[in-house]
Image: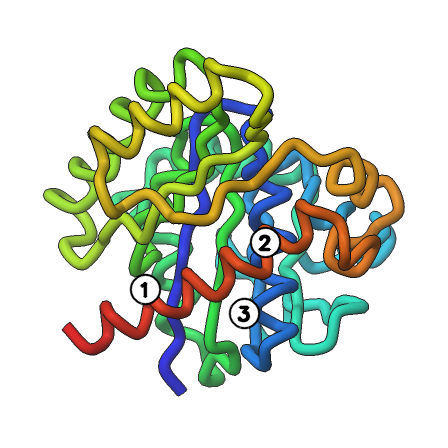
Amino acid sequence: MTTRIITIANQKGGVGKTTTAINLATALAAIGERVLIIDLDPQGNASTGLGIDRQERSVSSYDLMVGEADVARAAIPTAVPGLSIIASTMDLLGVEMEIAAAQDRVLKLRKALREASQPIDFTYVLIDCPPSLNLLTLNAMAAADSVLVPLQCEFFALEGLSQLLSTVERVRASINPQLTIQGIVMTMFDGRNNLANQVVDDVRSHMGDKVYQTIIPRNVRVSEAPSHGKPAILYDLKCAGSQAYLQLASEVIRRERQLRAA
């Protein structure tokens, strides 16, 4: 089985990164893919948003990073058929200090995924990164085939994007020459706001077809879903946000097929 690893990254918080990880993973699982989320954010929002209690996180992404557990042992099935997660704990806050002196400090996650004792039984692995360009995010990029960037429809969007893209370029040049930009997804879009429309136009003019056609709207039901431990697609399938994530999943699969055919 070929496994595609997609890192979902943006150094800015509050852009819908974890929401995108959860709902894209759920949408991919709903159309028959076997999906794993790796929660690499010490805040653990992806784990909480999928209903994983703290007591269930005895083996976590921290254990994966420091080589104390492999994927098969760390992955927890979720309530979504076909979707598992390697949950996060606060232990991740200290992992940078623990691995900082190691020569292979940016390759810890890649080794954990590539040197697993058992073949990884997932078609997609989505890595949810912390909101910073730190050692955890660099590990995620070093392990990935591509980076998916959620970008909020706000004034400083392009400024943050350029910083992230330069980091991707550095990782490609020094660590992972196969790394590509899978796509940029515009999030938290409010069609009544002229600025939001202008930001979308600006990002499209700079990034061209790297920007997905699907735009994720601001949506109350999507915001409510994590507090119920559910993806929005399970919480309210018919809401505009859920429908947008289903469309995004279709676009991601189309792009993946194009990449494989290239």
- Closer to the chain start, of discs 1 and 3, is 3
Tell me if label 2 and label 1 are in contact, CB under 8 Å. Answer: no
Residue 145: percent from left, percent from top: 30, 60
Q: Secondary structure at mark 2?
A: helix
* Residue corresponding to mark 1: 255
* Depth check, front residue: 37 or 200: 200
* Depth check, front residue: 104 or 31: 31
Q: Quadrant of residue 224?
A: top right
Q: Is residue 145 left or right of residue 112?
A: left
Residue 53: percent from left, percent from top: 85, 52
Q: Amino acid at mark 1?
A: Arg
Q: Residue at x 22, y 40 (%)?
A: 208
Q: Is residue 248 left or right of residue 73?
A: left
From this view, report whether residue 98 is shown above or below residue 161. Answer: below
Q: Residue at x 41, y 61 (%)?
A: 252
Could you give the CA–CA distance between mark 1 and mark 3, rounded to whole angstroms? 29 Å
Q: Secondary structure at mark 3?
A: loop
Residue 225: percent from left, percent from top: 81, 45
How packed mark 3 is, by other alpha carbons closer than 10 Å (few <14, some 14-19, many 20 or more), is: many
How packed mark 1 is, by other alpha carbons closer than 10 Å (few <14, some 14-19, many 20 or more), is: some
Could you give the CA–CA distance between mark 2 and mark 1, rounded to whole angstroms? 15 Å
Residue 167: percent from left, percent from top: 25, 32
Q: Is residue 155 left or right of residue 173?
A: right
* Residue corresponding to mark 2: 245
How packed mark 2 is, by other alpha carbons closer than 10 Å (few <14, some 14-19, many 20 or more), is: many
Q: Amino acid at mark 3?
A: Asp
* Residue corresponding to mark 3: 70
User: Furthest residue to the left?
Assistant: 173
Q: Amino acid at mark 2?
A: Tyr
Q: Is residue 204 left or right of residue 243?
A: left
